[in-house]
Amino acid sequence: MTTTVLAGSLEAAVVALGSLDLVPDADCVVVPTAAAFTGATEATVRAAETLAPLGARVEGLVVVTRDEAANDYVARRVEEADLVVLLDGAALHARAVWRDSALGAALARSRRLVAVGGVASLVMAVMVDPRGGAPTTGLGLREGLVVATRASGDQLARTRALVGGDVVLAVVGEDGVVIGEDGAWRVAAGSVELTRGASPASL
């Protein structure tokens, strides 16, 4: 089974992961690419502390360039890990680093993937550009909905209009969590607003 956790914050993701029966001493890798401009190493250390209640063995893969994303060891660790956590930050930078790379391909094959904040939008086939709310091309690691983080009412209205009514848009608050299991999505916790165009929707 492939499990995907899309969360507004790492803290919310940890709560959700507590219900997913991780194996004892699970092998967890943290990928802080999106945090490159604010401190990828520091973000990894904070993430390891936040993940500690899960009892997982945490390894940080500090990948911030395309050369690093091409590293075979990094790709193998991501593909083999019990849990892969993609930290929040500059989603467009992460897209540039991961697209058409060995790491990107390994992320697509990950069995249990957690994406936090704006990076949750990036992993979908269509992502929401954080600079103005327009839909753009995501990585396509997962499909079935479009994900956005909280924004102004005007920006979200623009996003809903541009995304249209053919797909569900999930606006995930900081405490919100959406979980996909083999492509079947459900709201697991917190503030998640679902719409198709301007109309309320469900998963």
Image: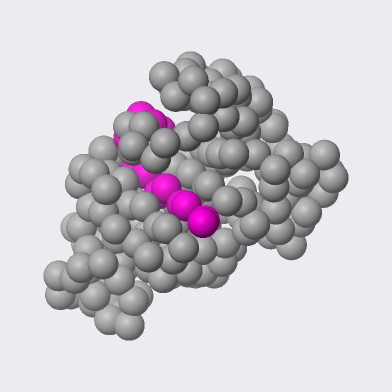
Residue nearest the viewer, comparing 33 with 179: 179
Q: Nearer the viewer, residue 130 or 103?
A: 103
Point out the stretch of residues depicted in magenta.
1-14
**In this rendering, is residue 111 above or below 175?**
below
Quadrant position of residue 96: bottom right
Which residue is painted at 29% across and 39% down in the image? 174
Q: Position of residue 26 (x, y in %)?
A: 57, 29
Q: How is the image coloured?
A: one colour
Magenta region includes residue 11: yes
Q: Name the foreground residue: 138 vs 52.
A: 52
Splitting the image into 4 quarters, where does residue 37 fall? Answer: top right
- Examine the rendering and report whether any part of residue 132 can be seen: no
Which quarter shows the C terminus? bottom left
Q: Residue at x 36, y 32 (%)?
A: 18
> What's the residue at 42%, 58% (across, down)?
181
Q: Is residue 10 left or right of 154 when viewed as pictured?
A: right
Q: Position of residue 16 (x, y in %)?
A: 33, 38
Location of residue 109 in the rendering, given as x and y in whole percent from the top left corner: 65, 57
Residue for point 42% across, 36% down? 21
| Residue closest to the eye, 54 or 88 | 54
